[in-house]
Every structure is written in C-alpha cells, then in structure tokens.
Image (cartoon, grey):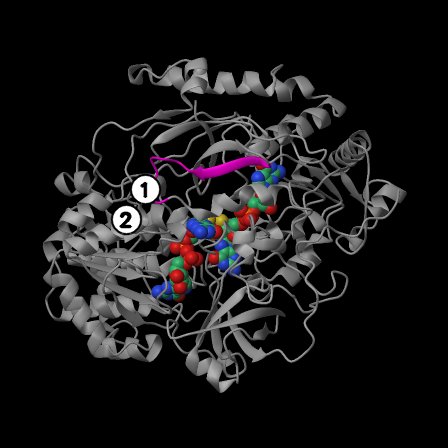
Amino acid sequence: MTVYTATHWGIYEVEQGPSGPVLKGHAKDPDPSPIGLAMVDAVRARNRVMRPAVRRSWAEKGPCAAPEKRAAEAFVEVPWDEALDLAAAATKQLIAEHGNEAVFGGSYGWSSAGRFHHAQSQVHRYLNCLGGYVRHSESYSLGAAKVVMPHILGNMDNLFATHTSWNVLEQHCKLFVAFGGSPAKNGQVNPGLVGQHMVRIGLQKMQQAGTRFINISPENTNLETGGEVEWIPIRPNTDTAMLLAIAHTLYTEGLHDSGFLARYSVGFDQFLPYLLGTSDGVAKTAEWAERITGVPAQRTRLLARELAGTRSVVTMTWALQRAHHGEQPPWALITVAAMLGQIGLPGGGFGFGYGTANAVGNVSPRVSGPSFPQGRNPVDAFIPCARIADMLLHPGAPFRYNGRDLVYPDIQLVYWAGGNPFHHHQDLNRLLQAWRKPKAVIANEQFWTPAAKAADIVFPVNTTLEREDIGYSAHERYVVAMRKVMEPVGESRSDYDVYSALAARLGVEAAFTDGRTEAQWQREMYENFRAKYPRLEFPDYEGFLQAGMLDLFQGEPSHVMLAEFRADPAGCPLETKSGRIEIFCETIASFGYDDCPGHPTWMEPAEWLGSPKAERFPLHMVSDQPFTKLHSQLDHSAYSKANKIHGREPVLISREDAGARGIEEGDVVRVFNDRGSCLAGARVSHRIRAGVVKLSTGAWFDPSSWGADKTLEKHGNPNTLTLDIGASSLSQGCAAQTCLVQVEKYGGELPALTAHEPPQFARP
Ligand SMILES: Nc1nc2c(c(=O)[nH]1)N[C@H]1C(S)=C(S)[C@@H](COP(=O)(O)OP(=O)(O)OC[C@H]3O[C@@H](n4cnc5c(=O)[nH]c(N)nc54)[C@H](O)[C@@H]3O)O[C@H]1N2
Ligand SMILES: Nc1nc2c(c(=O)[nH]1)N[C@H]1C(S)=C(S)[C@@H](COP(=O)(O)OP(=O)(O)OC[C@H]3O[C@@H](n4cnc5c(=O)[nH]c(N)nc54)[C@H](O)[C@@H]3O)O[C@H]1N2
Ligand SMILES: [Mo]
C-alpha cells in the first residue's frame, strides 16, 4: 500500500528510510517539484518551535505587558498549560474590555495543504466560537483583480476554473503573447495540492506544435518553452500604456472586430475618446507609449497587427496587478482581447495567470472538496488584506473600498496562524511599528519565523508530515489520504489541539470541537463530501484510506474559456451588471475615484522609472515568487539555501547596471531606498532589462536589530524596501511591484545571519 502526503507543491509518496521518511514525487506526476524533496530535514531543523514560548515581559509581568518591546526581547519557554492559561487570560480580558471588534483574525497566509488542518479555517472557527473577529477580504495574490474583475468580466473563481486548457492551446493557438511571461516555476504550486504539474509540459507541447511565443517582461527567465521565445523588454508597471497603444493601433488601422464589441461588450464608445485623445488631448499612440514603456513604437504597432492576423492569446501574470493602479493592466488586456474578437474561440482570446499557478489551464471535474466548517462570524468588520499596517497604525481612520466608505477598527488582539506577515507584507519596517500597537499578538507556528519572533505567545504546531489529513484542491484531479509519517517534533501539537485547549479555558469547548476528535472530524468531512456526489461512487472512508487517493479524472478534459458566452451571450451572460464585458463600467465610474476611473486608463504609478524619484533610486525592483520554495516556507531547507549567495537571497541585475556600479557576479550588495536597506547576492545577467532588478520574496526578514528603526536587513527580504500603499481606492490591493531602489556594492564586514536561528531564550 503506497503512503501519500500532499503539499501545495505536489503529492509525494512516502517510504520509511533508516533516518525517517523519504519523499519522492507521485508516480503519476509527469513533472514533480523538487521543493518537497528537501522537506523532511527542514521540519526537523533547529529552528522548529519546540516548546510553547512567551515573550519575557509577559512571563514576568503577566498578559499584555510592554507591547512596545514586542520582537525586541527574549522569550521564555514554558509548559503548555502555562502558555494556554496566559493566552486565555489575555483573550478573555481583551474581549471583555474592547469587544470582538478589537480581535483581528484575518490571519492571512497559505499555511499547509490538508482540508482539516487548514490553519485559517481552524483559527476562524475558534474565534467565531468566542464571538467573532475582524476578517480580511481578497488576497495578496489578487488584490486589485479580485475587485475590478467582477465589475468588468465576472466571477474570478469561475474564470480560473474555465481557462482554456493547455491541450486546446496546443492545437489552436498560433501566437501566445505573455505579459510577465508564463513562469513554470510558479506552476509548481497550487493552493491545496498539485496532482500533475502541467505548465512546463503545456508550454513545451505548444512550442512543438508550432505556437509562436512573445514575452513582454522586464526580465525573461519566466517563459521557457524549450524553443525560441521573442523577448520584448518593458519597463515595469507600464504594461497598461503598451496595451493602450495596441488598442490604438487596432482601432486606427481598422483591425478591431466591431461586431464582437457590439455583441459582447458595453462602453467601447465611451472609451474611444480617451484612446484617441479627443477627451484629454493625448492620443494613446505607439509613439506615446514608447516614451513610457521603453518599447520601440514600431514593435508595438507590429505586435497589434500580429495579434489581429492570426489565432492569438494575450495573457498576463498576476504580478502585473500587484502594483499601484493594478486594476488597469487586466482591464486593458481584456479590452484589447475584446477588440481582437477572439474571446471564446479555441486557442484565442485572453489568459490571466498561465503559469502563475498549476490550476490555470488545467481542467478537472468541478467537485467541491471536503471542508472544515468555520461557523458564523457575528462581527461585520473587515479590511482589504494588504491594509493591515494602516489598520493597526490608524484605528478609526476612514478608507475607501469598492464604492464603500469604511473605517479601520481598533485592534487590541491579533491571532495569527498559517501565515507570515513579516514575509508577505510591504514595508516591513513600517509593519514592525504597527505591530507594537495592539495589546496582544498570539501565533501558532511550526518554525521560528520572523512573525513568530514578533509574537507575545508562540504555540508550537505540527507540520503536515506529523498528522493525518485529507488533501484536496479545486482544479486538481486527486483527493489524497495524507498520512502521518513521523512523530511530532518537540512538544508540537496540532492547531486543533491548541484551539480545543483554549476553548476549554474560555468555556466554548463543546462549540469548538462539536464533541469530535480529529479522526472523527476527518471521517465526517470525507463522508459529507462523498454524500454530495453519489453518482461518482466514491469508496467509503476506510476504502479511501486503503486506496490512498481518489482519482476524479473522467475522460480527456478540455475547455475553451467563455465559449458558452460567445455562442449565446443572452442565454449565458457574464456575471457583470450588463451581462457583457464592461470596457466602460458605469458602476466604477459612479464611485468617482480619481485613481480608478470608468475605463482602462494609464496613470503614473507612485514610483516608476519615469518618476522624479528615479533620480535618487534609479532601479525598479520587481519582487517575484521564489522558485526554490513557496513564499517563505522552507526558506531554511537545503534546496532553498543552495540558491543563495553568501547566505543571502540573489538579486538579478543587468550587466549594464552591475558594471556601472563595479558589481560582479557573487558580490554581496546593499539594496536600499528611503524605506529600508537589505543585503543580497548579485547575480549579474543579460536576462534582465537595464534599470530593473529582481529580488524574489521568501528570505526570512532578518534586521540587524529588532529594537531600532530601519536597521540593515541582512538576508535579502524585498519587503524591507517595498511600498505599502493600496493599488487604488477601488481595491486597496497589494502594490508590492511598485518600488524604486538603488544598489551598491557592500564593502562592510558581512554580518552573521540570524534569520534561521531561534530567538534568545531567557530562563523562567
Ligand atoms: N514583495 C512582495 N511581497 C509579496 C508578494 C510579492 O509578489 N512581492 N506576494 C504576495 C503573495 S501573492 C502572497 S500569497 C503572500 C504569501 O505570504 P504567506 O502566505 O504569509 O507566506 P508563507 O511563507 O506561505 O506563510 C505561511 C506560514 O504558515 C506556517 N504554517 C504552515 N503550515 C501551518 C500549519 O499547519 N499551522 C500553522 N499554524 N502554521 C503553518 C508556515 O510555517 C509559514 O510561516 O506574500 C505576498 N507578499
Ligand atoms: N515556486 C513558487 N510558485 C508560486 C509561489 C511561490 O511562492 N513559489 N507563489 C504562488 C502564489 S501565492 C501566487 S499569488 C502566484 C503569483 O504568480 P505571479 O504573480 O504570476 O508571479 P510572480 O513570480 O510574482 O511574477 C511573474 C512575473 O511577472 C513579472 N513582472 C513583475 N512585474 C511586472 C510588470 O510590471 N510588467 C511585466 N510585464 N511583468 C512583470 C516578473 O518578472 C515575473 O517573472 O505564484 C504562485 N506560485
Ligand atoms: Mo499569492
């Protein structure tokens, strides 16, 4: 009987070796990810949280003592009961004094695979039992797009589930134009699990079938097909201008499909005066765009003709909308695709995130998997997820969001589980200040991440390998019986155990556990799932455990996105107000936001290569997703460390920019701006445009001192430098890709890394 585990980066078969479990890629996965192979050693590393730990002031003076010293003093390891008592006392006191509107349970983060031990579901259920919490909306992934797209195109989840499949692209697509590439390194991942990695193979098959590829990106490591790919280097955050210029060329050369626009869209006529410049005096020509994008006008104009002249897809990665005015690139992309008139045809139209995650282009039966009920949240307050520092710093301040005027709540208790805010949030020096405002921060963590180090109480929790679960992901083919393959490290427990114990102390144990053990919950979740789909004849729970996985495959799947809409726009309308693609959107226009008008618009981002600030900070920093890990997870694994330079995260820099600064491959450099500075290892390359550097996310935040302001970060965390503003008043999405920096060779003595060290411990 094969034993399986599942992770966001794949399903693995597990065998027991002389020194513990050994993972290997699932036999039916054609392109398993190496990330998982380094997991076992990493979960046993010395930076595991071994015992419950309490910040010194709390241990000595009691709950809520000295929040201003958060992250700046030693921890005391204490017995489980003591830590649970302290956490329960703080929770009780703060809810009694400030109400549940003062509890932040948004707890953003990817946590681990597995439907029962899903860290956010667990913490939400627990907090709901206590009377609720302030939640977050959207994600860092899709902050701008998730808000704008329902207005202009409809439900995003449906869109991702129905993206034209790789096999259809292979057969029909002649030209694939990718803004931000189509990075197979990102397709290693899918929230929940990956059954079969398809991105690299999908791209290779398209290439072999004769598809032509064009990559419009500041760097070109992100589209590998095994064959020729034309690279059009573009300045970051200027894609909207290029798309507008394509639209302008299509229109002025009569290449647009006016029949398609009339039948399937609304508002082209209101957009046209802007496009032609009759409303603002600026025609959005290819020459106009060249001054913004750096792409020669004739190349942009030719591209418009090429797109119109053949069966073509124009796609973009999600990174483009993770920027100031991030609503505009996807809106402009869809406008161009509507003008081309190929939406709903096999191998034509647009894409949004091919490569970004394995799910996009991967069709599988649409069943909704087992889930752990979170209960009802009586508190009706939320923030867009990337406004966390604003919320903590400015309680009571107003903010705008998607047509609503809202107010930041006054948070006194933060409970975080399954995420790493000191990885994922922008401008971490600012977050650190904000983090010292609430009276209590409690975290469940597996490792001494920077977020754990910045908590008052840390409860050590199990990793996937140390517990049983059910693996499932939307758009993937398998449901997996995830088996416990090693004993819990240290005194770690499951998140469920932690909440059960806290709930008992707070008088809500029965409500939280519903009288079930973990095993009983998992059986119940599986049986409920099975009962929903009687026709699929799933085995009973024992049968499922015995088999190790369910295969949901039902014949060769293929799909053409929006084919139904194309065939019958009245019968299968989009889920927008008009039922059609909204090139001009009355609803958005009615909000009156000057940073998000009613149609796709080029607006200068707060920082870019064309802004005055570029005189001092002349390099645009792109911070993409790391290929050796999932965000900050497994940053300390051997696989991730092997990619570092002198232990620091590599920064990709062009030969021109390196040469001008006397920087050579392998040098340690200082990357800096007004918000902070960090060390990174120079990787000098011809694959990145001059004026741009790339520092991937994931290196654990490692400031020289947690106590002082803006000290040198030693490890290469790009969020030391990024800008913490909302994409616009519409979405308030994460704008991490809008960031100017300067780079210099680092001449000082290399400071010792402490990122992967446990914190200082004091004796109780
Ligand atoms: N500059 C910049 N910043 C970015 C981005 C960017 O492109 N540029 N991308 C953003 C995006 S799209 C995202 S999604 C975020 C990702 O940000 P996060 O999702 O916060 O990052 P992870 O490293 O996945 O954090 C997961 C944490 O959960 C812990 N964990 C894992 N399993 C469990 C469990 O079972 N229980 C508990 N209690 N904890 C567990 C892990 O140890 C880890 O610390 O980053 C965002 N930040
Ligand atoms: N291995 C791995 N895979 C992952 C993740 C991970 O952490 N590790 N994270 C997952 C998550 S949570 C998410 S949300 C997705 C994110 O997926 P994406 O948002 O698509 O990924 P990124 O890697 O941030 O960026 C993709 C590409 O966009 C380019 N780019 C950045 N800014 C611009 C711009 O202004 N213009 C243009 N034209 N190109 C630009 C970058 O050079 C990069 O190569 O990835 C998922 N996949
Ligand atoms: Mo994400």
In the depicted structure, whether residue 217 falls above or below residue 662: above
Q: Do the residues labelled 1 and 2 touch (CB within 8 Å)?
A: yes
The spot of residue 208 in percent (x, y) is 18, 54
Q: What residue type is labelled 2?
A: Ile
Viewer-proximal residue among 292 and 405: 292
Q: Looking at the rendering, in which quadrant would you find the N terminus?
A: top left
Q: Where is residue 640 in the image (x, y as percent from the top left)?
A: 53, 55
Q: Which residue is at 50% across, 69% downward? A: 651
**SS class, disc 2:** helix
Residue at image mark 1: 30
**Cα distance between the residues tagged 1 and 2:** 8 Å
Q: In this view, does 179 lie above or below 117?
A: below
Q: What's the residue at 80%, 31% (across, down)? A: 85
Residue type, label 1 = Pro
- Which disc is residue 201 wearing? 2
Per the rendered image, the range of residues in magenta is 19-31
Q: Is mark 2 within 8 Å of ligand 2?
A: no
Image location (x, y in percent) of residue 455: 72, 47
Q: Magenta segment: does it hold 168?
A: no
Would you call the spot at circle 1 few (<14 residues within 10 Å), some (14-19), or many (20 or more)? few
Inspect this view and state whether residue 307 appears. Answer: yes
**Dividing the picture into quarters, in which one does residue 499 lie?**
top right
Q: Quadrant of the C terminus?
A: top right
Mark yes or no: residue 418 visible.
no
Across and down, in percent, residue 318 comes to 38, 54
Q: Residue at x 54, y 43 (%)?
A: 39
Identity of the residue drawn at 24% across and 42% down: 579
Q: Which of marks 1 and 2 is in front?
A: 1
**Front residue (pair 762, 247):** 762
